[in-house]
Amino acid sequence: MNFQKLIFAIIFLLTITTCKKEEGISTGEIKADIKTFYSLQNRIAKEFQATLSDTITDEYAHSERLLAWIKQQPDVQDAVMQFIYVFDVKHTNGLSGNIIFTPKETDGKLVTRGGFGNSDGKLSLLKSTDDDKIIENKNVLVLVQFGIEFYEPFSNGFYKNQKHIQTFLDLFEYSDIDFKVTVKVDEGISVFDDLSDYGIIILNTHGTTTGLVSGSNIFDNKLITFSDDVEVAELPKNGASQLRNEELKITSNFEYDSETKELTIEYVSYELTFDYFKKLPVQFDNTILLGNYCFSGIQNGIMGDILAEKGLKSFYGYGYENGWSAPVTNDLCWRSEDSIIVNLIAGDTTGIAHLANNTTKLQDDLKWKEDFLNNPVRRKRYAEQYFIFGPQTLNHYLDKGY
């Protein structure tokens, strides 16, 4: 009997040792694959720069040509153009990610929250004071990833017309309701594991058509445009398997100046896909969530449908009636958060009843003017390819019968 126990103990120890060895090999392999994938993204960026011109009037055609070039690369398994200058690429090593090219901006209002408005529109909301529509949880979470692009004081004056985050935090602080507001800025992927104890969540980050960007830096060292000399940071918990299963993707953003052809790497971060959120171990407390990022209303608010299975009560995002969604400016995001907060607090008899969109919606008039009205070629392309004929709006997607 003792001999059998000894044999079992030896086998058990060998199993643990083997598993640890395999785990180490797996981590090393995945880090090598990440660097290989980023090298591909750099090659794509070089081709983008080489074909960029200040005389381009049809960015869609330019994107199509770049997509064709990407598909011809021997290490590309598949590639899709998700939007103008937004490409979802899968490497032959199994890793996937988006590469996004955005125009250089100095005006904070025009900075977008994903891929590539100064308006008087107001959000009209319906009152509801039914007992089951009351927000009992007064804990508020404001998540801000990429803070430098979205709010002062994090941008340190880099952008003009940048909103100070305190202006909307004051709406909670100076209300008659005892809110407890938690603000988390640039804390990376780990913050998404801790969403359970809040009644209201405002999520500010960059978005994609397949999820949102976590804000976690994939590489430890400072990035240099086109340089493959990078060191992969410590992987997130379960990161290796999540990358293989496309729950995580590797998303990079390059900023370009069409006149000088200058191209700058802005970030390389993990994208959290819809599959990631399906497996997210979180239970919401009848929570209201504002997806304050580009493409948040894609597929008629699919993110809200996914999180509803985990107790989310209501979801606000940006999109069109046909289910498509597009990049959104800071201008609309700032007005949306203000409008929702004000109406939640003061727009009904209880001060905290949940509210729903009426017929008048906030819309991204500033982006429509800058990107479409002033560019008839782009406007024509968007109509033909995406059936987009007007400004994008803030929509109430989940449980909008309130």
Image (tube, helix red, strand yellow):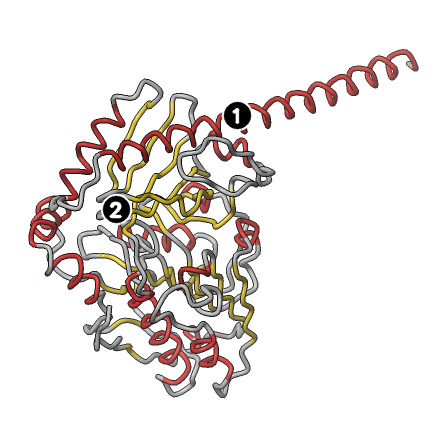
Residue drawn 42% across the image and 48% down it: 213
- Measured from the top left, where is residue 229 in percent x and y? 50, 31
Q: Quadrant of residue 336?
A: bottom left
Left or right of 384? Residue 301 is right
Q: Residue 223: x and y, percent?
A: 48, 41
- Residue on which disc 2 sits: 260
Q: Is residue 245 left or right of residue 160?
A: right
* Label 1 CA crowd tier, 10 Å (few <14, some 14–19, many 20+): some
Residue type beneath disc 1: Ala
* Helix, strand or loop status at disc 1: helix
Structural crowding at the residue carrying mark 2, measured as other residues with C-alpha within 10 Å and reported as few (<14), some (14–19) or many (≥20)? few
Q: Position of residue 144 (x, y in %)?
A: 47, 61
Q: Earlier in the sequence, mark 1 or mark 2?
A: 1
Quarter of the image with the N terminus is: top right
The part of the image, by quadrant, that contains residue 237 is top right
Tell me, for residue 32, which label it has, or none.
Answer: 1
Q: Tell me if residue 263 comes above or below residue 14 in the rendering.
A: below
Left/right placement of residue 7 relative to residue 134 reads right
In the image, 388 versus 59, the foreground residue is 59
The answer to which of 179 and 228 lies nearer the viewer is 228
Q: Residue furthest right?
A: 2
**Residue type of the residue flagged with mark 2:** Thr
Q: For this rendering, which residue is in front, 98 or 4?
A: 98
Labelled pair 1, 2 in contact (Cβ < 8 Å): no
